[in-house]
Amino acid sequence: MPFLFAGLLLVGTLCVLNLLLTLGAIKRLRDQQDLLTEIGSGAPGLALGEEIEEFATLAIGGEIVGRDHITDDTLGGFFSPTCGPCRRELPRFVEYAGALPGGRGGVLAVVVGTEETAAPFVQALAPVARVVVEEPGGEVGAAFRTAAYPTVLRVAPGADGHVVVTADRVDLGRAARAVA
């Protein structure tokens, strides 16, 4: 009988150890996934100098937003409420956008998701940006060829009048300033 209890205790201990190691491996994989998402796994969309495709949609509040409405340097941000790095970057984006000269007219924020899941993002972004909520594969995301979230870039009309990407990665940790 003592051998049976010792064997049972050994098997139980091994099961608990296995469970702890599995949970540790899962946590590590999630951390690495967030890190890969933060640094990007390739181009997040359009590259520097590429032209924005035609789009026109309604922002929250009924304002029309489209490629033809981008007449100056514009900060663009694409977020998803289901994305961990998006939740971490949102306050930095809001602070950066709020410091830009020209106000919310020079900022376009796109939240990819349903109206219910996007509500906290919309609430945070609305004071500093024109906000569009759209489903995955929506018109604005397609025009910017957004492939990862969060994506933050700057666009402006080029010499030929076409709207192009002027900065394909924006460092939200640096002070906001107008692009000359």
Image (cartoon, grey):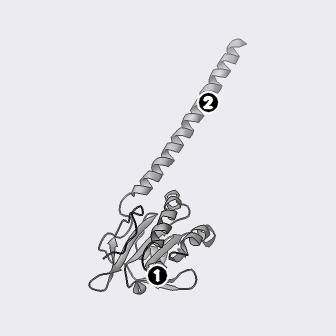
- Vertical relation: 37 (above or below) 68: above
Residue shown at 57% from the left, 32% from the top: 18
Mark 1 neighbour class, 10 Å CA radius: few under 14, some 14 to 19, many 20 or more: some
- Vertical relation: 172 (above or below) 69: above
**Nearer the observer, 177 or 143:** 177
Task: Describe the element under mark 2 as helix, strand or loop.
Answer: helix
Q: Are marks 2 and 1 in contact (CB under 8 Å)?
A: no
**Nearer the observer, 87 or 103:** 103
> Circle 2 is placed at which residue position?
15
Q: Which mark is residue 105?
A: 1
Residue type, label 1: Gly
Residue type, label 2: Cys
**Nearer the observer, 13 or 125:** 125
Mark 2 neighbour class, 10 Å CA radius: few under 14, some 14 to 19, many 20 or more: few
Q: Nearer the viewer, mark 2 or mark 1?
A: 1
Residue shown at 67% from the left, 21% from the top: 8
**Nearer the observer, 72 or 25:** 72
Residue shown at 51% from the left, 48% from the top: 30
Residue shown at 55% from the left, 61% from the top: 82
Residue 150 rendering spot, x and y as whole percentages: 46, 64
